[in-house]
Image (spheres, grey):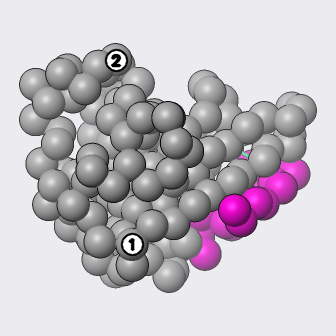
Amino acid sequence: MPTFISRSADQTVALGQRWGQEAARGWIIGLQGELGAGKTQLVKGLALGLGIRARVHSPTFALLHEYHGGRLVLVHLDLYRLETRKEILAAGLTEYFDHPSGLTVVEWAERWFGTEKHGPGCDRTAAAFYRSVRITSLDEDTRRIVYEDSGG
Ligand SMILES: Nc1ncnc2c1ncn2[C@@H]1O[C@H](COP(=O)(O)OP(=O)(O)O)[C@@H](O)[C@H]1O
Ligand SMILES: [Mg+2]
């Protein structure tokens, strides 16, 4: 699986920026990693890569933010507060996995897609393309970012 070692928040943003530039409509990117791993930094990069000027922050309390004004709409979900699939269903968020539009990025993606297999979770989304990303902190400034694509 492709692995990237990031040595600063800026390098993580730059990786997200490249992904934002290559993203196509309907992509879903699922992010796994502990608090402070750098998931939101990666989302900042996605926004930059799409040409979105708004400042990105974690939607932990809002569940979701949509950013317009870029090449694609960026839909940013954060499942941190939803612990079970039932809660995610009840919150009405599965619509975003069944009918993804623009670029959809999901923090705490394992809450919906599971961790069983660090992979596609194909039955959990109708997206044509799903990128499953895991970020691990190696030390204060170093992160290992591993990802796996399915579909596309
Ligand atoms: N290589 C790195 N990649 C991403 N973030 C880093 C890195 N090194 C240090 N950081 C810091 O770690 C924190 C990551 O925060 P954030 O992206 O909000 O995490 P999460 O959304 O996963 O909880 C930020 O304060 C960032 O500056
Ligand atoms: Mg976050």
Span highlighted in magenta in the image: 1-18
User: What type is the residue that disc 2 sits on?
Assistant: Glu
Residue at 10% in and 35% down: 92
Lateral position of residue 14 relative to residue 138, left or right: left
Q: Is residue 54 magenta?
A: no
Distance in Å between CA atoms under marks 2 and 1: 27 Å
The disc label shown at residue 83, or none: 2
Is residue 48 visible in the rendered structure shown here? Answer: no
Lateral position of residue 98 relative to residue 110, left or right: left
Residue 17 rendering spot, x and y as whole percentages: 59, 70
Ligand 1, what quadrant? top right
What residue is pinned by disc 1?
151
Number of callouts? 2
Task: Identify the element where label 1 is drawn.
Answer: strand
Residue at 73% in and 38% down: 136
Residue 143 rendering spot, x and y as whole percentages: 79, 44
Where residue 1 sits, quadrant-wise, is bottom right
How many C-alpha atoms fall within 10 Å of the one at disc 2: few (<14), some, or many (≥20)? few
